[in-house]
Structure formats: C-alpha cells, structure tokens
Amino acid sequence: MRRVTRNLLIAIALVVVALLALGALPSYLGSGDPYYLTAEPIETNETAADVNNVTDRRYPFLTGALTSDDGRSEGYQTGPYGVKEWFTHTPFDEVDALTQQVPEAATDDGVRVRRDGRVYHVEVVQP
C-alpha cells in the first residue's frame, strides 16, 4: 500500500472516530443542578397539544413525565460551555417543539398537552 493511501485511510479513520465521539460523549457530560420536565394535571377547556401518539423515542422527557408516579421526567444536566446542547436532546427542545406545533397551547412557562382525555401543564423546572 502506498504511503499516501495509508495516510488517507488513517485520516478518514480519525475523522470517523472523532465524529462518533462527538455523538456519544456529550450525553455523558453534565454539570449543575438537573432540569426536569414536569406534567401537572389541570382542569381547563383551552387548547392543548394532542400527545396521544407521541413516542418515547421522539419525546423521552415528556413520556417519562406523563407516565411517572410523581409527574417528573428523568433529570437533564446542562453541559459546560453550552456544547452539550448542540449534540443532545433536551427537555427544552420538547417544549419548544410542542409550542411550535400548537402555538395556542403555549403558556408563559410551558405548554398544555392532552393525553387520554386529561389535560396537563408541562414545563421545565429546576428545583
């Protein structure tokens, strides 16, 4: 194998390893107090986003909060220098996505969602 070909293959392998590290590493980073997505049942006739068909792959924090006993999702810690948010899924992303899908369901601090005939107020909190 020629030297140029070998160096090219090594460079490609290093780029692939670096990209894999950028995809996996940020999820392990975290600092500060965790953020939680909370779902609190409310009584209202106002517009709410329908989340009966959402999956835990697309909305892991929302489904975690709706199915948990205390109405709170798994914790999410922000990364140093804001780098983690570029590469990972956050509870803030889920609230923003629901707000964009149904703008009328947005509240000052979260969004109203409807699941199985019940309405919940969903927001990101940091205790």
Image (cartoon, rainbow, N blue to C red):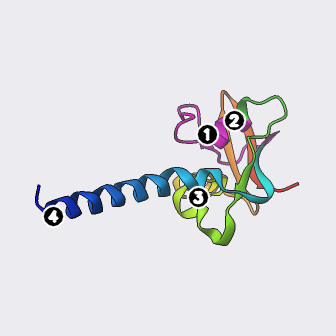
Say what amino acid the circle numbered 3 marks.
Answer: Pro
Query: Which residue carries the number 2 mark?
Result: 64
Question: Picture coordinates of residue 5 (x, y %)?
Answer: 14, 61
Categorize mark 4 by other alpha carbons within 10 Å: few (<14), some (14-19), many (20+). few
Question: Which one is earlier in the sequence, the residue at label 1 or at label 4?
Answer: 4
Mark 1: few, some, or many residues within 10 Å (few <14, many ≥20)? some
Q: Which amino acid does label 2 sit on?
A: Gly
Mark 3 nearby-residue class (10 Å; few <14, some 14–19, many ≥20):
some
- The residue carrying mark 4 is 3
Dot 2 and dot 3 residues touching (CB under 8 Å): no
Query: Which residue appears at 65% of the width and 48% of the height?
Result: 47
Q: Which residue is drawn at 58% across and 42% down?
A: 59
- Looking at the image, is 33 positioned above or below residue 72? below
Front of the two marks 1 and 4: 4
Nearer to us in this view, 116 or 8: 8
**Distance of mark 1 from mark 3, alpha carbons?**
21 Å
CA separation, marks 2 and 3? Answer: 23 Å
Q: Name the residue that disc number 1 marks.
A: 60
Report helix, strand or loop for mark 2. Answer: helix
What segment is highlighted magenta in the picture? Answer: 39-65
Indicate which disc, 1 or 3, sits on the residue closer to the N terminus: 1
